[in-house]
Image (cartoon, grey):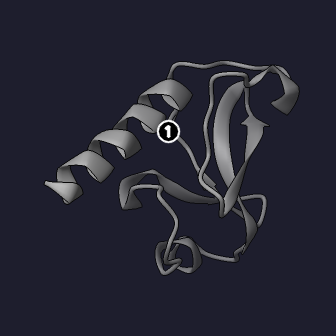
């Protein structure tokens, strides 16, 4: 039951972020990120970017623990781990 609630919350955050466009991070009012990440505006799409998530390869982002970004949405963009919904 607890897993279902957590999964529902994560999916709700994904749905909010997936639907929000932006010109700057300040325009991402509905996007909610977990405590390990911060809101970013990438290519006109609101996303969550790891605070300490520097990467060289996608694998660097896939191994991050305690980040509520589903594996299929994790990307390494401009040497930052980002939770991208528009890819």
Q: Residues within 10 Å of mark 1 (few under 14, many from 20)?
A: few
Q: Is residue 40 above or below residue 58?
A: above
Total number of numbered discs in the rendering: 1
- Residue reaching furthest to the left: 1
- Where residue 56 appears, x then y in whole percent? 69, 77
Q: Nearer the viewer, residue 32 or 85?
A: 32
The percent coordinates of residue 64 (x first, y second) are 53, 77
Q: Residue at x 73, y 31 (%)?
A: 43
Give the quarter of the image for residue 82.
Answer: bottom right
Q: Residue at x 72, y 22 (%)?
A: 29
In the image: residue 56, left or right of residue 9: right
Image position, residue 79 (x, y; %): 76, 67
User: Is 7 situated left or right of 30 in this image?
Assistant: left
**Residue 26 in the image, given as x and y percentages of width and height:** 86, 26
In this rendering, the answer to whether 76 lies above or below 40 is: below
Q: Residue at x 45, y 51 (%)?
A: 73
Query: Which one is in front, 76 or 37?
Result: 37
Q: Relative to 78, does residue 16 appear above or below in the rendering?
A: above
Residue, disc 1: 87
Classify the position of the N terminus by image quarter. Answer: bottom left
Regarding mark 1 in the picture, which secondary structure is present there? loop
x 25%, y 47%: residue? 5
């Amino acid at each position: 039951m607890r897993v279902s609630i957590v999964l529902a919350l994560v999916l709700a955050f994904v749905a909010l972020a997936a639907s929000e466009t932006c010109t700057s991070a300040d325009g991402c009012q509905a996007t909610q990120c977990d405590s390990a990440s911060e809101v970013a505006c990438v290519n006109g799409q609101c996303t969550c970017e790891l605070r300490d998530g520097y990467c060289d390869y996608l694998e660097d982002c896939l191994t991050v623990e305690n980040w509520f970004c589903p594996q299929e949405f994790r990307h390494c963009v401009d040497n930052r781990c980002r939770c991208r919904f528009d890819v």
